[in-house]
Image (cartoon, grey):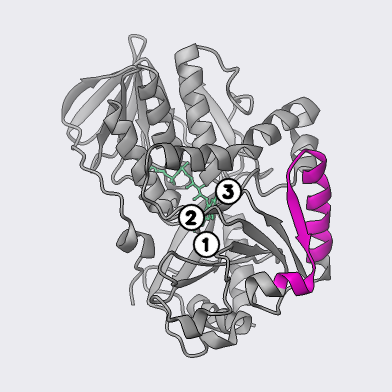
Amino acid sequence: MKQNNLWQETSQEKLTSKVLEGTVESDITIVGGGYTGCSAALTAAENGLTVSLIDQQIGYGGSGRNVGLVNAGLWLPPEKVEGILGKKGGVKLNEALATAPDLVFNLINKNNISCNADRAGTLHCAHSQNGLKDIKNRYRQLSERGAELKVLDKNETELVTGSSSFQGALLNEKAGTINPLSYCLGLARIAQSRGANIFESSLATKIEFHNNEWITHSEKGLIKSKKILIATNAYLKGISGIPSAKYTPVFYFQAATKPLPKEIIKNILPKYHGCWDTATVMSSFRLDYDNRFIIGGIGNLGQNISKIHSSWAKRKAYSLYPSLKNIPFDYFWGGEISMTDDHIPKIYRFGKNAYSIFGYSGRGIGPGTYFGKSIAEAFYNENEDSLPIRPTSSNNQSFSKIKGSFIELGAKINHLI
Ligand SMILES: Cc1cc2nc3c(=O)[nH]c(=O)nc-3n(C[C@H](O)[C@H](O)[C@H](O)COP(=O)(O)OP(=O)(O)OC[C@H]3O[C@@H](n4cnc5c(N)ncnc54)[C@H](O)[C@@H]3O)c2cc1C
């Protein structure tokens, strides 16, 4: 069996685009059409800048493959963020990303993006007593910073998940779920309707700075611009002439059933919350709009679907929900996460008016949309005040395939047991 991505099959948003041919001049070039690139293109176009975005396919990367949990903040709890960035920088980033679900759902509503957005809330589920301590600690930190959350006890968690597997859960009623690829395509469609040039089947192959201009080459054409954003996150495909973003690649995969009848799902996530757990080798689970059950875990499926990970998905689904016994999974697909050393995204300034944004470390729907919007604001305001984090001019992350392989080994061992 080969990988088949549920979101590719169920996306309602469609896009008509061109291939980059000949020479195009724009104020801004954007390389990469995920949330970061599309959100930047939309904001730039809405503010009257000319913008050209190129990719092989909009939503080809993490934005077209993820779980679809629209959460506030980063994976890291806010005290950790403040510890790493210092009080002032940490507070700025925490406050910015606390608003990210509002940004995402408002964009969807305002622009009628068809992505099955459901602001039903998300649940961070405690898989153990230590997990429960973790969510209570997160609750304290986030509540002190104004978030409206609830800690659910074991019984309350069982009521909302339909599973007896958890010791409790942290409920964020302002978060929610989307069809992630549809959201990305919708952003691109709206950006295009505001005047952005969206080019597909067009990979950037070489970028050079010449006569005060960035020249981005693709196979059949080139874009000239004064400003450039590289928004390729974990999916960078060789571009010569500029330094590459460095990160640790971590794989995550998902499996989904066909739409399930009422008698099978009647106790599963009755309020359609999106969920993930506190385990180190974490799992996620949710229903989609048509009642497909979707489970996810860390690991590299490979093109031919790793037996270790696919068997785990079936066992895990059954252990959470006995009614899923013998229900086959029809979809298996995976994606890559770009993890930074400190799990904080980076804005890397690699030249004049030239930035690369990456390293969302597994939470990029809200953050990608926010960072994309902010960099476009920085471009038209011609200052960096709007950026949620200070850009760096050194790219000293460790690109650690070894670290990534170690995480994969841990996931395989965990999924074998
Ligand atoms: C399996 C999985 C599950 C996840 N679950 C969640 C979740 O539930 N919630 C959440 O908030 N986050 C989640 N994330 C993280 C989130 O998906 C990413 O952080 C986010 O999509 C990153 O967006 P982006 O626009 O920066 O990059 P991407 O969406 O990865 O886009 C990068 C784009 O760059 C393009 N590109 C690369 N090289 C070139 C080139 N040379 N020329 C032109 N284009 C190029 C690629 O084709 C790609 O389309 C998950 C990630 C994965 C992989």
Where disc 1 sits, the SS reads strand
- Disc 1 Cβ-to-ligand 1 distance below 8 Å: yes
Amino acid marked by disc 3: Arg
Mark found first going from the N terminus, 3 or 2: 2
Looking at the rendered image, the disc whose residue lies closer to the viewer, 1 or 3, is 3
| Residue in front for this viewpoint, 31 or 386 | 386
Decide if residue 399 is on the left or right side of residue 31. right
Find out whether residue 339 is within the magenta segment: no
Where is mark 1, residue-wise? 252
Decide if residue 219 is on the left or right side of residue 184. left
| Residue lying farthest to the bottom in this orientation | 326
Where is mark 2, residue-wise? 336
Where disc 3 sits, the SS reads loop
Splitting the image into 4 quarters, where does residue 206 fall? top left
Amino acid marked by disc 2: Glu
| Residue in front for this viewpoint, 194 or 112 | 112
Residue 25 at x, y = what percent? Answer: 25, 18
User: With respect to residue 50, does 288 lie above or below?
Assistant: below
User: With respect to residue 406, does 44 lie above or below?
Assistant: above
Residue 61 at x, y = what percent? Answer: 40, 50
Where is mark 3, residue-wise? 363
Splitting the image into 4 quarters, where does residue 284 fall? bottom right
Q: Is residue 271 visible?
A: yes
Compute the Cα span from label 1 to label 3: 12 Å
User: With respect to residue 384, does 69 lie above or below?
Assistant: below
Q: Residues within 10 Å of mark 2 (few under 14, many from 20)?
A: many
Quarter of the figure that contains the C terminus: bottom right
Q: Which residues are magenta?
A: 131-157
Residue sitting at x 42%, y 36% = 110
Compute the Cα span from label 2 to label 1: 6 Å
Do the residues bearing badges 2 and 1 touch, measured as CB atoms within 8 Å?
A: yes
